Image: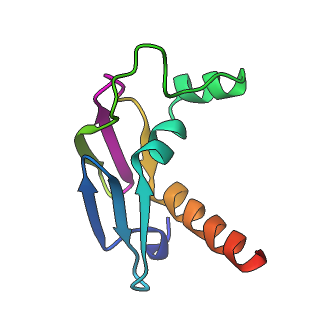
Amino acid sequence: MTNEATPTKVDVDRATGLTLTWPDGSATTYDLEELRVNCPCAECRGLRDRGEAAWPRPSSPLPLRIEDAELVGAWGISFRWNDGHSTGIFAWELLRAWRDERHADEQTH
């Protein structure tokens, strides 16, 4: 993992989402739904691979909220959601790649 893929600041707002500040000074905000829908855990990936939604599920509480967040070493962050889900680990490199994809999309439109 490069230092460029490791945020210098992590701000979790349980009601709105995650904001990461990167070494170049730029900040990226990920909203709750974007994070929950794209959870990288095996269960959620399997649902998406079958064409099913990882979130919301029929029993999902609304509004979506982060109940807890935990840094996973220097590697990433995990969330415990108000729907009980807690197995996804969002690696800094994954979140940085999402940011870079956004910037590429903005430049082509």
> In the figure, 80 relative to 14: above or below?
above
Quadrant including the C terminus: bottom right
List x then y, in percent, for residue 97.
59, 62
The span shown in magenta is 75-85
How many numbered marks does the figure carry?
0
Location of residue 78 (image quadrant): top left
Q: State the residue in front, 58 or 24.
A: 58
Is residue 40 visible in the rendered image? The answer is no
List x then y, in percent, for residue 12.
26, 55
> In the figure, 20 relative to 61: above or below?
below
- Residue visible at 67% across and 74% down in the picture: 106
Image-based side of 66 in relation to 46, left or right: left
Q: State the residue in front, 74 or 89.
A: 89
> In the figure, 49 relative to 64: above or below?
above
- Residue visible at 44% across and 57% down in the picture: 30
- Residue visible at 65% across and 65% down in the picture: 101
List x then y, in percent, for residue 76.
38, 52
Q: Residue furthest bottom?
A: 24
Image-based side of 33 in relation to 108, left or right: left
Q: Residue furthest front?
A: 62
Q: Residue furthest left?
A: 68
Location of residue 100 (image quadrant): bottom right
- Residue visible at 36% across and 67% down in the picture: 20
